[in-house]
């Protein structure tokens, strides 16, 4: 058997050593060491080249086309985020979604107040859940029905990865306290299961809720920017992970990161409101054009 240079070998102990007799034998007769020495190890080729690029060379995909090229501070200031873009509830499910998000906002305001970096950590641990849950549900549905998903899975998983990158960025800037980590664990456990059930039963309402959640995220990040501009939060250098992910200039600052994150949240807001509309109007194939309101 020919093995390539990129093949890693795994050696297993012979299984015969598991079935040795329990009687006392002379050292020279069928001892475990003599048996093991007489049987060559099993060699299994494990290709590594196919997987190494996933970790070394893969460039994470941004959610906005503007970040495919290097963005200066001036470019980031021009990013459209629709500060007044609010989707008014049109039915009971929309009203429930909005009320749920507003209730979560009150809790966050009470707990974090103006500690916006710590608030961002909590926000992103929650915001990264819906895309993964929805992607999982639709992935299983696609397998079960043996048909194309219409492009939802890729978009939803990309959204989840983007929100996770937000979290990893903020973790380079602040260190959450032990009770904040405990709160994150509790909130994630509750929110994941609640959203999973909600998406199984009411996917339109679930996407509408995420749209409203992103609206609140934009409000929070805009207030974050105001605190930086007022000098209440130090405008330090941007973490390297943020510079690489959003293709920021090497001298990028914290303010540039907030602008980039806010632009991402605007994209998620618009996408999830459209998803809810598509489910309502039964136009779920993303490959087909759809006129949003």
Image: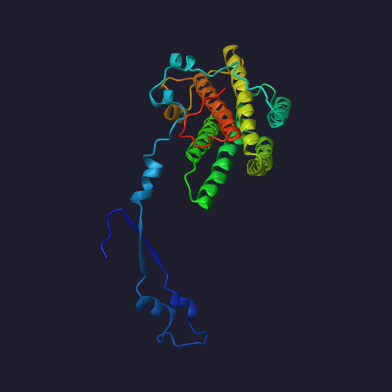
Q: In this view, does 268 lie above or below 84?
A: below
Residue 114 versus residue 12 in the image, above or below: above
Could you tell whether 102 is left or right of 137 in the image?
Answer: right
Q: Considering the image in quadrants, where does the C terminus appear? A: top right
Between residue 119 and residue 23, name the one nearer to us.
119
Q: Residue at 53% x, 31% y: name it.
A: 166
> To which quarter of the image does residue 178 belong?
top right
Q: Which of the pair 273/253 is nearer the observer?
A: 273
The answer to whether 170 appears left or right of 14 in the picture is right
Q: Where is residue 253 in the image (x, y as percent from the top left)?
A: 48, 20
248 vs 27, nearest the viewer: 248
Quarter of the rendering containing residue 31: bottom left
The residue located at (49%, 51%) in the rendering is: 146
| Drawn side of residue 14 relative to residue 259, left or right | left
Residue found at the very far top of the displayed protein: 230
Q: Position of residue 115 (x, y in %)?
A: 65, 24
Residue occupying image coordinates x 60% and y 27%: 214
Q: Position of residue 85 (x, y in %)?
A: 59, 18
Quadrant of the image containing the N terminus? bottom left
Q: Where's residue 40, x and y in %?
A: 34, 73
User: According to the image, what is the colour scheme of the structure?
Assistant: rainbow
């Amino acid at each position: 058997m020919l093995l390539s240079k990129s093949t890693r070998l795994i050696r297993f102990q012979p299984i015969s050593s598991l079935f040795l007799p329990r009687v006392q034998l002379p050292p020279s007769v069928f001892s475990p060491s003599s048996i093991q020495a007489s049987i060559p190890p099993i060699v299994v080729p494990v290709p590594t080249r196919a997987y190494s690029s996933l970790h070394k060379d893969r460039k994470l995909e941004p959610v906005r086309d503007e970040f495919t090229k290097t963005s200066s501070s001036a470019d980031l200031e021009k990013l459209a985020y629709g500060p007044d873009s609010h989707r008014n509830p049109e039915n009971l499910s929309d009203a429930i979604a909005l009320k749920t998000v507003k209730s979560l906002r009150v809790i966050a305001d009470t707990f974090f107040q103006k500690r916006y970096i710590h608030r961002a950590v909590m926000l992103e641990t929650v915001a990264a859940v819906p895309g993964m849950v929805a992607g999982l549900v639709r992935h299983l549905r696609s397998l079960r029905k043996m048909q194309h998903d219409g492009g939802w899975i890729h978009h939803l998983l990309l959204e989840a990865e983007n929100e996770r990158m937000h979290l990893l960025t903020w973790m380079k800037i602040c260190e959450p306290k032990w009770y904040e980590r405990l709160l994150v664990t509790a909130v994630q456990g509750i929110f994941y299961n609640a959203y999973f059930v909600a998406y199984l039963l009411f996917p339109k309402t679930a996407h509408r809720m995420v749209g409203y959640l992103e609206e609140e995220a934009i409000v929070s990040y805009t207030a974050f920017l105001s605190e930086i501009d007022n000098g209440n939060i130090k405008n330090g250098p941007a973490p390297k992970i943020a510079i690489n992910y959003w293709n920021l200039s090497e001298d990028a600052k914290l303010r540039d990161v907030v602008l980039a994150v806010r632009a991402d949240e605007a994209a998620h807001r618009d996408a999830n409101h459209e998803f809810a509309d598509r489910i309502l109007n039964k136009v779920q194939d993303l490959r087909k054009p759809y006129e949003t309101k």
